[in-house]
Image (spheres, rainbow, N blue to C red):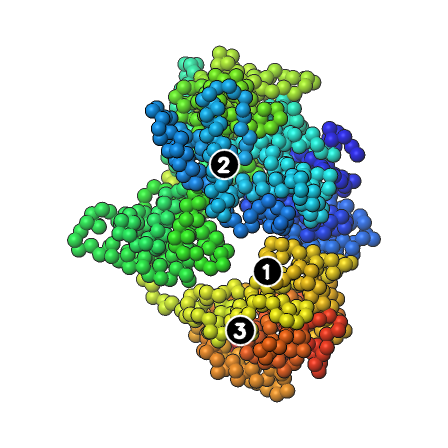
Amino acid sequence: MTSPHEVKAFDISGEVPHGTTLLRASAGTGKTWSITAIVTRAILEGDVDISQVLLVTFNRSAARQMRHRTYARLARTAEMLESGLPARDDLDHHLLAQRERRDEFLSRARSAIQRFSTATIATTHEFCAQMLTELGVLADHDLRSSLLADPTPLVDEVSADLYLSRYSHVPRPPSSATIRSLARTVAAQYGTVELQRDSDSRRVEERLDIAEAVRTESSRRMRAGGLHTFDDLIEDLARSLGSTQRGRVACATLADRFHLVMVDEFQDTDPLQWEILASAFHGRSDLWLIGDPKQSIYAFRGADIHAYLAATRQVDHTYELTTNWRSDQGIVDGVDQLFRHTHLGAEGIEFTTVSARHTHRRLQSTDPHGYDWSHPVQIRCITASDGSRLSSGRAEDLIAKDVGAQITAMLDGRSQWQPEKGQPSRPLQAGDIAVLVTARRRGTKIQNELRKIGQPAVFTGSTSVWSSPAATDFLDLLSALDDPDPTVISRIAMSRLIGAAPYDLARQDSQLRSALAMDIANWALAWPNLGPWGVIESLLHRPGSLDSMLTGPQAERYVTDLRQLAQETHVWACDQPTMPTPAQTCAWVEDQARYAPQETPRRLETDRNAVTIMTVHQAKGLEFPVVLLPDATLSWISKNGEGTRRKQRASRTFMRDDGSPLVWFDGERRVLNLSDVNDPARLEAWAQIRHDALAEELRKLYVALTRSQSAVRLWWAPVPGRIGDSGLQRLLALESAGSEAPVFPEPVNDAAVSPPWLSPRVGGASIEAVPVEVTEAPSRELPVPPVGGTPATFTRSVDHQWKRTSYSGLTAGIHGATSSMADLVDASAGQDEPDEDALGTSPDVSPSTGDGLCAMPGGTSFGLVVHEILEHVDTSVPDLSAEITNWTARKLRAEPIDGVGATSLAAGLVDVMHTDLGELAPGQCLADFKPSDRLAELDFEMRLAPSSPMSNTVGALAQALSDRSLVPENDPLASYGRVLATSPAASTVLSGYLTGSIDAVLRRPDGRFLVIDYKTNRAPRPAGQPLEPRAYDVTTMTSMMISSHYPLQALLYSAALHRYLSHTMPGYDPATCLGPVGYLFVRAMAGVATPADASMPYGVFTWSVNPALVVAVSDILGGRHEH
């Protein structure tokens, strides 16, 4: 084993390290590529199975991107191995060099792609929630509790009650606002951070007592109310793994579940998260910690660089990525010139030099008189004409003007950008330029300056879409849908949604309010079908509404925010079991405004070519050909990342201790200090916090600089009280360090500040410093899209028969369920079959007499668990019984069912897997179908006729079923056509989309594909008679099939498979590729001893569907009238 302090260059084709490995990834060095390559190699070489992979990242969007990139890497590698494509990177070369293993690699790649959903790729909170569920009774967590995204209201209640009980008789009590602020800090914001008790002050002791009381009572009320927070998920899992009684078993369970664990952006971890990883995986699994401490800039979200440093001292191996794939050599050299021989806060955060893949300059001017790109890094020095220092406001104004002038010069049409060597160059565009700021106020000022000179610019800002003006109006609309209060309706009328003036509402003959109230009432009635998105779309199509929204400043921003709010909310609503009410939706949106500002990136308001303005934090992970940094020496640094900027601006000081609670690292752990300003313990904490803030300022500058691919421009201005503490000035003030140990750039006194061109770190081919005389940039007319004109008249008729439906939607009325066939969106769309209780097949849920699965209770919950287990079971494992037992225990631990034991259910499902399938698959059972011949849960969205006039009805399907050339008289389901033709569903129009999910598609050795559907229905039986496999004979199963309308489901699924194969399988022929349909009534499948009735074993209903019938059904669904 190598020493963890021996840093080696990472090579994907080299020896694979085992144990805990730290992978240091400087900006632009291919971190995500490395993660996906490591996972791909581990899977293909047989080190892990896809289901044993755990990838943890920092937010949902990053998790989605990681999931996409990992799948794409596996798919591309499989394509290369299968088709002989040339190698494109080092991993490809490594795999292709092992020719004798190519078939082995391809088989594993295909299997991983097929079962990709079994990999766990999640955020930290999602991972903790999932593990608490899987651990079940091993976890110290109430699985029935609900998530409380923001505990602040509950903590406020506790604070108010505590204040009354504690100070109601005190003559001069502290203010309730002071106690409330303290309570929020210790219980809502830093509830998991240990309180520091190093003070003898009575005032501090009182604060600590209050803090403990608030935490205790808040926790009690949370448990009593069945609630938990995001922090509780992490704390509960950490406590479960550290338990003296169950911790060892819990840790072993997680380590057995995941053999390869990779944690992205590990520099933003915190002590509890590292405690979980260390307990569960350190020394047990292959644990990779990937990140760059130089990019740790999220202290305000709880990231603790000290936790990262502590973890690095425990790893077994340390590797680093050494090639920058993003930036040109000039940018890499310039960053190296500024940061060389420095550390960015502590030992272990040293700046390291990397090489550049792009050794040439990709940004050039085609004209000697065009923009000068000769120096990749340029510091533009703003000075007063008389050489005096500048005020903060004056410096910001001058810099904003110069930013505009620079962008205008860059976009004169004479600059060419070449994305990759060998690719054609193109003119530099506005979208290639990013302006990175440190505060929203600065971004808005620069955006306004660019608009004045006619340069389009979009600013995502640092605020969330959930707290935008559009969100306020959206909440009012949701509130009115729930309760049409006249005051709220009036407020909506005067908002940008409608745009009415007070005069319009005050007129006696005004019908505006009543018309709006009528529209809102109609939307409320249609809410179950429309949902949030449908309501907003209806509003946007309301005469005059869109005109109102597009009038005035920030019009595109408002409409974009409104659409994003509606879409995000609609996605959430569709994920719920039933459509939430407007009141529930309103509460969820309010939660997002309190909790999720960083989780939902704000969309750009226009797709026109525009300069991008964003904060440094938002830009992390992105890249741009040109990056402009107007705030390089104008940054305010705030304590704990919180809002003390107002005091700082007033006092013109770097940082000022205002006496609020401090979170700091005391050398051993993270603690919360509540002491007074002059307390000795406080002074030590303040010194550490000040140092950490200075260090993070350096790291923010590093992040900002490394977003650039080819050119970066920084602005410098001599502003007293601000410049000396900025990261840029501190770097410029450092002397050349030669071979000395890395140093930390300390703040510089204002009197010692000198212009950048005097710095030893400026000069050469990469960095230049130039004095700037700011002039007004030439103005350009900003193209404005035409607004107004004559509103278009809607002349088309609305097709009310067009909808998104499913098998259960088509048969809902038949089974007695409520159905609205004319609704725009089928209420049951997305479900592939009705509940068992709706089928008339013994809806009792209590256990009955009998053996095996026949003795199990009925009900939807049991059916869902059986389906999920059969979906996930891997038939390629050596011990299938153990595999089924493992999945059964996991599912029942998460979702217990009365009367169902894990051992007995597993035994019954083992029998199901080994029951002979008769003519469905001669000589085979389910266990014989390996993953490569089995596709579980094939979801489909099948297009029906595009409009009602072109569509058929369900009755046309009944006619096809009654056609004896397609369904012969001796077919066991020959009578079903008549049953369907006389059912209420026969007149249902087949227009729109049909959705569903096939339980499994199997491929027989003869190449035919089988549609499989698992059924847990009970067979009808006389009262008091035990349920036995013999109850599922051919006659009974046929009756159950017809009464439940399963033949219709079988045909719909067969048509979906037919269309899928016709688009994906070369040489597809329905006559030779489509096989029988199997409906497996699993209660009767008792293993190898299962008796048979004629050609069908009990429980295995086989329908040999004529391929011509399947093609005819597909044509009917698509709207063809000849079949």
Residue 542 vs residue 585, the one in the foreground: 585
The quarter of the picture where the C terminus appears is: bottom right
Mark number, residue 839? 3
Element assignment for label 2: helix
Q: Are marks 1 and 3 in contact (CB under 8 Å)?
A: no
Mark number, residue 897? 1
Residue at the disc numbered 2: 216
Q: How far apart are marks 2 and 3 (CA)?
A: 51 Å
Upstream in sequence: badge 2 or badge 3: 2
Residue 634 vs residue 252, the one in the foreground: 252
Near mark 1 (Cα within 10 A), the count class, few <14, some 14-19 or many ≥20, is some
Residue type at mark 2 is Thr
Left or right of residue 493: residue 353: right
Element assignment for label 3: helix
What residue is drawn where x is 68% and y is 63%? 904
Left or right of residue 923: residue 513: left
Residue 1017 vs residue 639, the one in the foreground: 1017
At which x and y percent is residue 1038? Answer: 61, 80
Viewer can see residue 375: no
At which x and y percent is residue 409? Answer: 47, 32
